[in-house]
Image: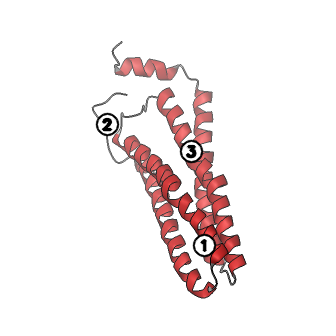
């Protein structure tokens, strides 16, 4: 079967307008989780200043919980709803450069979170159990938290800008 624009349009039309709206709702709710979780991380990092090893441990556990139960499901939900959107609408997987950019940013964020952020938070929890001098440790840990949090906000802002402005055109791929 040759994949022409008409063929893809016909396939995309098989999904109802109502189903497309529900996919969009899922995508927006997932993005809301991702953004809300990042805002919660920012609040914990900026407003909660641990004064003891126990408080530092509590902060690190809170950050891990937010990441695991809010941010990760939000990012994965964006990925899943993006896949549904790509399969069931004329946008496709690789038809537009801005969609490819969103795929790369989203997948990169998920991989970075799983391979870097989660192990780093786990080490932070372990380190919180062993430290004695809270003032020295706190500033280095806060600096790292702010760095990672800044990267998260930059990622979110980039994806929102790409989603709204759709800055790049079509590719030669019609998938």
Depicted 159 relative to depicted 42: above or below: above
How is the structure coloured here? secondary structure
Q: Residue 27 in the image: x percent, y percent?
A: 57, 42
Q: In this view, does 109 lie to the left or right of 118?
A: left
Residue assigned mark 2? 170
Assign the N terminus to one quadrant of the image. Answer: top left
Q: Going by the picture, which residue comes out furthest to the front?
A: 130
Depicted 97 relative to depicted 119: above or below: above
Q: Residue 14 in the image: x percent, y percent?
A: 53, 19
The residue lying toward the viewer, choosing from 97 and 40, is 40
Give whichever of discs 1 and 3 has the lower sequence position. 3
Residue assigned mark 1? 127
Residue assigned mark 3? 76
Question: Depth-wise, is mark 2 or mark 3 nearer the camera?
Answer: 3
Q: Going by the picture, which residue comes out furthest to the left?
A: 172
Q: Residue 41 in the image: x percent, y percent?
A: 61, 66
The residue lying toward the viewer, choosing from 90 and 50, is 50
Q: Which quadrant holds residue 68?
A: bottom right
Q: Which quadrant holds residue 42?
A: bottom right
The residue lying toward the viewer, choosing from 164 and 143, is 143
Between the residue at mark 2 and the residue at mark 1, the CA separation in whole angstroms equals 49 Å
Question: Depth-wise, is mark 1 or mark 3 nearer the camera?
Answer: 1
Q: Would you call the spot at circle 3 few (<14 residues within 10 Å), some (14-19), or many (20 or more)?
A: some
Residue drawn at x 58%, y 43% is: 77
Residue drawn at x 61%, y 76% is: 46
Assign the C terminus to one quadrant of the image. Answer: top left
Give whichever of discs 2 and 3 has the lower sequence position. 3
Secondary-structure class at tag 3:
helix
């Amino acid at each position: 079967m040759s994949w022409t624009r008409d063929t893809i349009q016909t396939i995309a039309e098989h999904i109802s307008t109502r189903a497309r709206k529900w996919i969009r709702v899922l995508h927006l709710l997932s993005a809301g989780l991702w953004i809300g979780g990042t805002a919660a991380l920012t609040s914990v990092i900026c407003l909660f200043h641990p004064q003891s090893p126990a408080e530092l441990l509590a902060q690190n556990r809170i950050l891990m919980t937010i990441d695991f139960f809010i941010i990760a499901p939000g990012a994965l939900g964006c990925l899943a709803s993006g896949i549904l959107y790509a399969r069931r609408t004329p946008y496709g997987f690789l038809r537009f450069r801005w969609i490819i950019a969103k795929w790369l940013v989203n997948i990169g964020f998920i991989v970075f979170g799983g391979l870097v952020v989660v192990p780093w938070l786990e080490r932070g929890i372990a380190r919180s159990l062993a430290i004695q001098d809270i003032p020295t440790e706190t500033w280095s840990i806060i600096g790292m938290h702010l760095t990672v949090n800044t990267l998260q906000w930059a990622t979110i802002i980039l994806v929102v800008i790409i989603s709204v402005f759709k800055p790049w055109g079509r590719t030669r791929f019609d998938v």
